[in-house]
Image (cartoon, grey):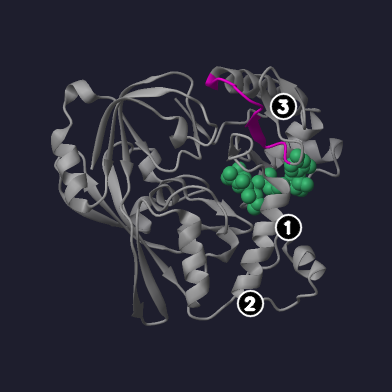
Amino acid sequence: MKDLRNYSLAQHNTFGIDAKCSRFIEFSSVAEAKETVKNISDEDMPLLLLGGGSNLLLTKDFNGTVLHSAIKGISSTFIDGGVLVRCGSGETWDDVVAHCVAHGWYGTENLSLIPGEVGASAVQNIGAYGAEVKDIIYKVEAVEIATGKSCYFTNEQCEYAYRKSRFKEDWKNKYLITHVTYKLSLVFNPHLDYGNIRAELDKEGISDPTAAELRNAIIKIRDAKLPDPKVEGNAGSFFMNPLVSKDKFNELLKKYPQMPHYDVDDTHEKIPAGWMIDQCGWKGKTLGRAGVHSKQALVLVNKGGATGNDIVALCDRIRSDVEKKFGIDIHPEVNII
Ligand code: EPU
């Protein structure tokens, strides 16, 4: 177990912002998670539960305690119609995808190369290329911070929605997630009809991909569009794609017939924030040391030495421009501290 004071979080956030926390505790087992919650007192508050830091923007030092899981391990049990894959919350998500693809356990391929850790996958309901992790989450195990008791939640109890779960709402800072179990299939039933997956496979002359080939195609698509945080600090999509009413959507479509959109339900439509930011002319532009990625306008980047407030200033300018042009208030997906 690590228990450090006045600790720099520079290595714990993919924006690469050098902010400190008063206390940093890392636990490597359920027993250590229980010991951790026993050891924290009122003066250690507030808490910040941290995964890989790939969805976090620090604007100042955090005068509280950061808790991080380093619980590792991937184990599997075969059940009727599939396999249950139980992973430590500190496992790197993409290592889990690689492991599952290599073993012929299917359902994670489209979520290849999403940065971050297993615990956060269950908090954030990570998603990409037509898939969301909620579709494969079977069970989430945790330690209750107030009591130190072990508990678990079913998928339904977590109330998953787009980039959302109860862990971000009424369960915020109440549980340390220790393990997540995913239910995967032993039959490969790929989802290829999203964005440019088929176009990418076509380039390789593949019409009927294996899971490894699909994973490789997704990795290539992501690599081409999304900046590597080791080279240029970023947190993937900075904003969520907004849901708008059908009325609002129809009004916009008249003005922008080329506008991409996704049907959500009978009353709502989702409009890509990246497209709106691009239409506002922000793609590839910078504001001080913060910038908008040149290949995907939804991603804000640290151009070198940016502070959290530099990124927030850019975020505010973009929000205001999108509001003026489209009458839509877009919201950060990133957790701003
Ligand atoms: N678009 C533009 N200009 C841009 C960016 C996008 O015109 O600069 C257009 C695209 O041409 C496309 C549409 O907007 O018609 C959507 O773009 P894209 O397919 O790249 O996906 P997105 O909606 O911008 C979402 C997720 C990503 C995920 C991709 C692929 C959110 C907030 N983001 O982005 O997730 O990888 O779909 O499925 O839902 C993340 O959460 O960090 C993330 C990268």
First in residue order: circle 3 vs circle 2:
2
First in residue order: circle 1 vs circle 2:
1
Q: Which of the 4 quarters of the picture holds residue 290? A: top right
First to last magenta residue range: 296-308
Q: Amino acid at mark 2?
A: Thr
Q: Please give the label number shown on residue 210.
A: 2
Q: Nearer the viewer, mark 1 or mark 2?
A: 2
Residue at position x 53%, y 22% in the image? 308
* Mark 1 residue's CB less than 8 Å from ligand 1: yes
Q: Position of residue 100 (x, y in %)?
A: 48, 70
Report the residue marked by disc 3: 322
Is 306 inside the magenta-drawn segment?
yes
Report the residue marked by disc 1: 195
Q: Position of residue 134 (x, y in %)?
A: 46, 57
Q: Is residue 183 rendered to the left or right of residue 227?
A: left
C-alpha distance separating marks 1 and 3: 24 Å
